[in-house]
Image (cartoon, grey):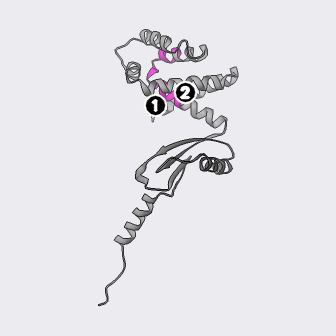
């Protein structure tokens, strides 16, 4: 809980500053890169959380990795975070910033899980229906899970619609387990 609160406060400050400087899209792209590096590079993440590495060394590493790829404002923000000994929260701050950006741009992230890949026509229908529901833009994340057998599971915001064959089979199993049939012979 503490990490989320810290990350959201720093992300809000950065987002407000990015809006003030009229560069929220560029900073969002920088945050996407930071999340990608943190997610794909375990050593980088360990370096950020290591108490054995001095802040100056961490600053140099961050500047070397991101210096040519992100805006100067974002780089200075990362250096300030490191000087304040909050570098362990960099990934969380980046994720929170992305959420703030999506909220600002009215973009809803929806996850669609299917048993096999959708065709483009059906994908467009799903996106159109979600746009009508949310009255905003849709970022659709598709995942394929063969164990669903058929159908789909759609999740966005606090909603989840499960129309999978797997769920229907589970429901039938529960109904058979509570069979009220009484043999009369």
Vertical order, 84 against 162 (above or below): above
Judge left or right: residue 135 versus residue 43.
right
Q: Quadrant of residue 140?
A: top right
Outermost bottom residue: 185
How far apart in space, not on screen, are marks 2 and 1 (Cα)? Answer: 19 Å
On the image, the x and y values in percent for residue 182 come to: 33, 84
Nearer to us in this view, 184 or 9 = 184
On the image, the x and y values in percent for residue 4 come to: 48, 33
What residue is disc 1 on?
3
* Residue at the (68%, 50%) spot, across then down: 132
Image: magenta residue range = 79-95
On the image, the x and y values in percent for residue 12 come to: 59, 28
Question: In the rendered structure, are the residues bearing label 2 and label 1 in contact, judged by CB atoms less than 8 Å apart?
Answer: no
Say which quadrant the C terminus sits in: bottom left
Vertical order, 183 against 39 (above or below): below
What residue is disc 2 on?
32
Q: Helix, strand, or loop for circle 1?
A: helix
Residue 83 on the magenta segment: yes
User: How would you rate the neighbour count of disc 1 (Cα within 10 Å): few for under 14, some for 14-19, many for 20 or more?
Assistant: few
Residue 25 on the magenta segment: no
Foreground disc of the pair 2, 1: 2
Nearer to us in this view, 84 or 152 = 152
Q: Which is more N-terminal, label 1 or label 2?
A: 1
Vertical order, 92 against 69 (above or below): below
* Residue at the (60%, 45%) spot, across then down: 120
**Majority secondary structure in the magenta region:** helix
- Report if residue 33 is visible in the image: yes
Q: Helix, strand, or loop for circle 2?
A: helix
On the image, the x and y values in percent for residue 9 come to: 55, 29
Task: Identify the mark at residue 159; answer none if there is no mark.
Answer: none
* Residue at the (36%, 17%) spot, across then down: 51
């Amino acid at each position: 809980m503490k990490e989320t609160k810290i990350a959201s406060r720093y992300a809000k400050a950065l987002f407000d500053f990015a809006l003030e400087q009229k560069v929220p899209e560029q900073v969002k792209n920088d945050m996407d890169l930071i999340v990608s590096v943190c997610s794909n590079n375990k050593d980088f993440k360990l370096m950020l959380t290591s108490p054995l590495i001095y802040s100056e060394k961490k600053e140099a590493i961050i500047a070397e990795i991101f210096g040519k790829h992100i805006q100067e404002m974002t780089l200075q923000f990362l250096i300030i975070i490191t000087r304040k000994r909050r570098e362990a929260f960099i990934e969380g701050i980046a994720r929170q910033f992305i959420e703030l950006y999506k909220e600002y741009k009215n973009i809803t992230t929806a996850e669609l899980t299917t048993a096999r890949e959708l065709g483009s026509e059906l994908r467009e229908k799903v996106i159109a229906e979600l746009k009508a529901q949310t009255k905003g833009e849709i970022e659709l994340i598709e995942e394929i899970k063969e164990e669903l057998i058929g159908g789909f599971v759609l999740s966005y915001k606090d909603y989840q619609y499960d129309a999978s064959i797997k769920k229907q089979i589970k429901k039938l199993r529960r109904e058979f387990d509570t069979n009220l049939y009484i043999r009369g012979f």
